Amino acid sequence: MGIMPDAWIREMATTKGMIEPFVEAQKREGVISYGLSSYGYDARVADEFKIFTNVDNAIVDPKTFDSTSFVDRQTDICVIPPNSFALARTVEYFRIPRDVLVICLGKSTYARCGLIVNVTPLEPEWEGHVTLEISNTTPVPAKVYANEGLCQFLFLKGEGLCETSYADRSGKYMGQRGVTLPRL
């Protein structure tokens, strides 16, 4: 399994719609960078956020998730409370090829501010907006800037095709749009 370079990512994005919208070169002037990099793609966070709150004393339970655990905000700057987290989504819509697995890592600019980005792997033939989990590990509020880079996706090409893809299994998060809460 090898990591795929910029030329392959560009080709797949422009001819197969793997990433839409696709930004061909790193954008950096006055923003946290996003776009195509040497061996990955730096995705932007959209302006839709679900910020964790404990106003209603809800319990986070992945089997019976209570949406009152979050407050919805559409904003250019999301402030995540201390020791809390928010859900967001990528601006980009991804379509993963059958022979590729994608992993995501947070950008160093945010990591150096105590913000951690978590995303489970994007499985072969999954598609949708990626729901991003952003944890503020600091004891102070932290800002996240919409429509700027938040994380980098790395594309790992398998040595062959998988027997069963995410689409074959009719995965519960297939084709998600917007910020998607846990499903059972």
Image (cartoon, grey):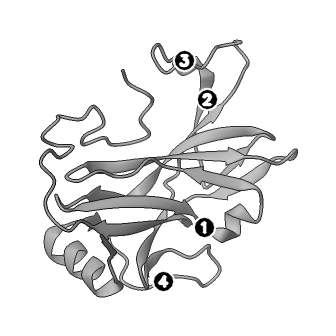
Q: Amino acid type of disc 2?
A: Val
Residue plotted at (30% across, 40% down): 176
Q: Is residue 43 above or below residue 173?
A: below
Residue at mark 4:
26
Residue contact between numbered discs 4 and 1, judged by CB atoms under 8 Å: no
Distance in Å between CA atoms under marks 3 and 2: 17 Å
| Percent coordinates x, y for residue 145 in the rendering | 63, 60
Residue at mark 1:
107
Tell me if mark 3 has few (under 14), some (14-19) or many (20+) residues whose alpha carbon lies within 10 angstroms of its own: few
Look at the image and tell me whether residue 67 can be seen: yes
| Percent coordinates x, y for residue 107 in the rendering | 60, 67
Look at the image and tell me whether residue 21 can be seen: no
Q: Is residue 51 left or right of residue 65?
A: right
In the rendering, which numbered label is found on residue 71? 2
Which quadrant is the N terminus positioned in? bottom left
Q: Secondary structure at mark 3?
A: loop
Q: Secondary structure at mark 2?
A: strand
Q: Amino acid type of disc 1?
A: Lys
Q: Is residue 93 left or right of residue 14?
A: right
Q: Is residue 108 above or below residue 48?
A: below
Distance in Å between CA atoms under marks 3 and 4: 39 Å
Earlier-in-chain disc, 3 versus 2 = 3
Residue contact between numbered discs 1 and 3, judged by CB atoms under 8 Å: no
Residue plotted at (81% across, 41% down): 82
Q: Is residue 52 left or right of residue 159?
A: right
Distance in Å between CA atoms under marks 4 and 1: 13 Å
Q: Secondary structure at mark 4?
A: loop
Residue at mark 3:
61
Tell me if mark 1 has few (under 14), some (14-19) or many (20+) residues whose alpha carbon lies within 10 angstroms of its own: many
Residue contact between numbered discs 4 and 2, judged by CB atoms under 8 Å: no
Earlier-in-chain disc, 3 versus 4 = 4
Earlier-in-chain disc, 4 versus 2 = 4
